[in-house]
Amino acid sequence: MEDYQLLIDLHKRAKRQGPGGDAETSKAIDLAMIDPSALLKIADIGCGTGSSAMLLARVLNAQITAVDFLPDFVEVLKANAESEGLSKKIDPLVCSMDNLQFDNEEYDVIWSEGAIYNMGFKNGINDWKRFLKTGGLLVVSEITWTTDGRPFKIQKHWEAEYPEISTASAKISILENSGYSPIAYFVLPERCWLDNYYRPLQNSFAEFLARNANNENAQAIVEAEKKEISLYEGFKKYYSYGVYIARKLG
């Protein structure tokens, strides 16, 4: 099994494929002032196994296109939606986020938690803007520095992993210069990283290794995940995901 398939195998059984939380998704809905009774079309881009899409379907009067480029994740989403009776409200789609075939101004809301980094924040918000109706809402989470300065070790790590990492003020400026009016911003709290993502991931390592005969590639993946967790535990006051909520201008 290739490393890519091993990563899928590790993450597809988890509720979340990155930091986040139902409470924080609900908070974003509230801050965006979305009317739960309004009939909406929403695109959840980079949906993973569908944690956010499922919550949006439960609490909003919306038809949701849930997009991910990994068929394994989309199959889990389909099964979860079926088990909760939400299949009629969620349209799963296997597609790359940088090759979406949506119509112009098709959606009232574009939602993306922990995924826009795959094409870059600036590229993502500019590319997806055409799919939003005028006055439509953009809700995205993005890795963000939470202090003006930080230790060299963590600075070097994130600049190598994701050169677009920056402060919230810089990200908000990009939104303003890209035809959006920022509405709200908040930072994901520690529990979204540890309780909701890293601890369940750690608890899955033993079964993951056993499924894959404890082979060298699987061990390397686990060690890389452990390193990432250790970095967060050591430097968590310097970065998190910021949730950015903005409206498309005319």
Image: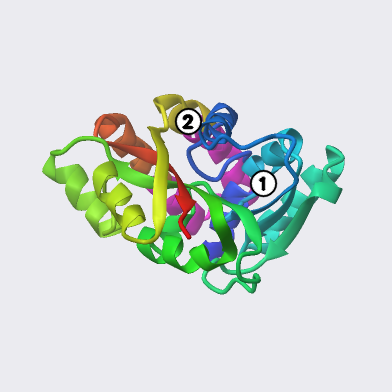
Q: How far apart are marks 2 and 1 (CA)?
A: 16 Å
Q: Position of residue 34 (x, y in %)?
A: 61, 37
Residue drawn at x 40%, y 60% is 179
Q: Position of residue 8 (x, y in %)?
A: 59, 56
Residue drawn at x 41%, y 54% is 180
Q: Is mark 2 on a helix, strand or loop?
A: helix
The magenta segment: 197-224
**Residue bearing the label numbered 2:** 192
Residue drawn at x 62%, y 60% is 68
Q: Nearer the viewer, residue 171 or 184?
A: 184
**Residue bearing the label numbered 1:** 50
Residue 110 visible in the snapshot: yes
Q: What element carries label 1?
A: loop
Above or below, 213 against 103 in this view is above
Above or below, 130 against 159 in this view is below
Left or right: residue 113 versus residue 126 is right
Above or below, 37 against 248 in this view is above
User: Considering only order in the chain, which callout, 1 or 2, is on the residue closer to the N terminus?
Assistant: 1
Q: Which of 22 and 175 is in front in this view?
A: 175
Left or right: residue 208 versus residue 94 is left
Residue 141 in magenta stretch: no
The amino acid type, in three-letter code, at marker 1 is Gly
Q: Where is residue 31 in the image (x, y as percent from the top left)?
A: 51, 32
Above or below, 128 against 202 in this view is below
**Category of crowding for the residue at label 1, using alpha-carbon neighbours closer than 10 angstroms: few (below 14), some (14–19), many (at least 20):** many
Based on the displayed image, in which of its 4 quarters is residue 52 positioned? top right
**Category of crowding for the residue at label 2, using alpha-carbon neighbours closer than 10 angstroms: few (below 14), some (14–19), many (at least 20):** many
Q: Nearer the viewer, residue 144 or 248?
A: 248
Q: Which of 25 and 221 is in front in this view?
A: 25
Q: Is the magenta stretch mostly helix, strand or loop?
A: helix
